[in-house]
Amino acid sequence: MIILLGSKTNLEINSPPQNDPELRRYHQAKALGKKTVLFVCTANAIRSQMAEALVNHFLRDRWAAFSAGFLPQTIHPLAVKALKEIGLDPGSQTSKHLDIFKDLKFDKVITLCSQADEECTYYPGMEEKVHLPFPDPGVSFSSFWGGAGRFRAVRDEMKKVLLAYLEQDLPGRNP
């Protein structure tokens, strides 16, 4: 067991099952020479899920993206809808606790919300942590009653910012 010391809480990390599909996907990506990025958001229900799907689609030949949270929740249906609108199907993605990745070394760990940034001050195997905050489209009451526009706006901004950020970290590119 590993204990993460964050600015507000201590989190106990238990060992994940060795046959976890995410672990297999990680090792396969590394064997193919891909860079790896872990997106962290508190609930792993909206922003980190969208980031994972976007990177795995648009940068799939060079990056393998994963996502996790400290308090994983069910993936928000409007996040799924926003991704499907641009031809991405996150149907195989699940909300995951950060502990399943504790023994892996990522090229980048990117926090997407302020709470994750505060809690994720150190993580085993973290090569580099970056904080790229995006607003939470699920916080307003209207998001549950047709507020899909907020999800689209965050999706589009994430696509623009995250893909450009990761593209600059590829061999042969000048930042």
Image: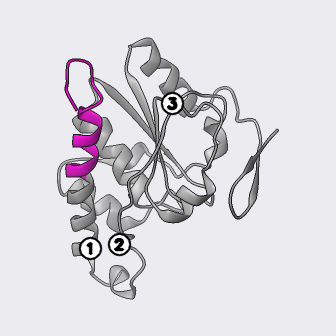
Residue numbers of the magenta segment: 159-175
Query: Under tag 3, what secondary structure?
Result: loop
Query: Under tag 1, what secondary structure?
Result: helix
Gap in angstroms between the C-alphas marked 2 and 3: 27 Å
In front of the other: label 3 or label 1? 3
Quarter of the view holding residue 21:
top right
Q: Which mark is residue 106?
A: 3
| Residue in the image at 58% along x and 59% along y | 118
Quarter of the view holding residue 151:
bottom left
Specify the farthest residue to the right. 1
Gap in angstroms between the C-alphas marked 3 and 1: 30 Å
Q: Earlier in the sequence, mark 2 or mark 3?
A: 3
| Image quarter in which the N terminus is found | top right
Q: Which mark is residue 137?
A: 2
Looking at the picture, which amino acid does disc 2 mark?
Pro
Quick check: 73 left or right of 11? left
Q: Residues within 10 Å of mark 2 (few under 14, many from 20)?
A: many
**Residue named by callout 1:** 150
Q: Residues within 10 Å of mark 3 (few under 14, many from 20)?
A: many
In front of the other: label 2 or label 3? 3
